[in-house]
Amino acid sequence: MPAHWLEQSLSTNTLPKDFHLIMKKQFLMATAMASLLALSAGAMAQNLAIVNGKAVPKTRLDALAQQVAKAGRPVTPEMEGQLREEVIAREVFMQEAEKQGISGSDDFKAQMELARQTLMIRELFANYQKKNPVSDADLKAEYDKFAAANGGKEYKARHILVEKESEATAIIASLKKGGKFEDIAKKQSKDPGSGAKGGDLDWANPSSYVPEFTEALLKLNKGQMTDTPVKSQFGYHVIRVDDIRSAQLPAFEEVKPQIAQQMQQQKLAAFQEELRKKAKIE
């Protein structure tokens, strides 16, 4: 008898009765194995790693990468490797936390609820700002308003601030006799910011000061000093104007991002206030 039935069949040109059944079973087995291999490969492609027998889906890495990108950081291949390690480390730590039953504690549940509220509110505000952007026309109008309020003249002034009117009067007398303003300011001024700089207040719009100071400042010409002490909520001032110039305002494009941020915050604050007013609170 030949060593293999196939050799016998070929030599006699006859096939076993169950030949087709055997071939069909082998074909089905091969097809099943191929399907399993394909499914396995697909599952591996969808998973980042297997940690202690638990699959870590690649979507976690994608979500973390999106957060990094939103923060303005480029997701380089090196960064992606670091994020992969971060996702795996989190899974390791999460599994241990689950083992210890941390997720069942009241404190954990309270913190999760606070985190849920924070995320939902953040998304609510982000959606509002996305649907209600500040137009360029609004930005320009706000800039023009700012320019009108801060235009005109700027003053480069110095001052000496003291507690008592008699002190200010004595300083004025000393200055009129030739005393140096900068030296007296450094020694006697109560204003630590300008005092250390000889009373220098740098360039500023007069409206940026308290009303009493502004009123006295506007009466002075370049090089002039107040003849009498100027009283304000801070004490008594001796003021001198070193120079006057037309206001130097930044160009619209330079301050456009800051104006946009400020107006977006204002719109969001108004939205929040509107929701609070509409809410029925008992």
Image (tube, rainbow, N blue to C red):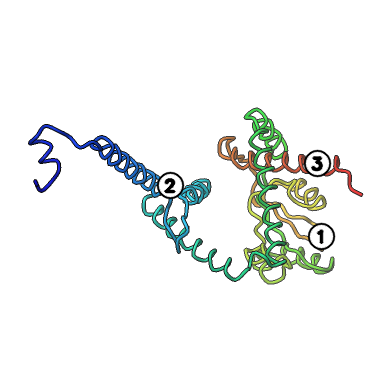
Regarding mark 2 in the picture, which secondary structure is present there? Answer: helix
Label ID, residue 229: 1
**Pointer 3 or 2: first along the chain:** 2
Residue nearest the viewer, comparing 270 with 61: 61
Q: Is residue 187 left or right of residue 92?
A: right
Regarding mark 1 in the picture, which secondary structure is present there? Answer: loop
**Pointer 1 or 3: first along the chain:** 1
Name the amino acid, label 3. Answer: Leu
Q: Residue under circle 2?
A: 46
Q: CA distance from mark 2 to mark 1?
A: 78 Å
Label ID, residue 115: none
Q: Looking at the picture, how far across and down is residue 249, in whole percent?
A: 61, 39
Residue nearest the viewer, comparing 236 with 176: 236
Q: Residue under circle 3?
A: 275
**Pointer 2 or 1: first along the chain:** 2
Residue at the image point whose x is 20% and y is 37% from the top = 16
Q: Looking at the picture, how far across and down is residue 172, in whole percent?
A: 76, 63
Residue nearest the viewer, comparing 247 with 39: 39
Q: Given the current orientation, which residue lies at the most extreme right position? A: 282
Q: Does residue 227 sit above or below 41 in this rendering?
A: below
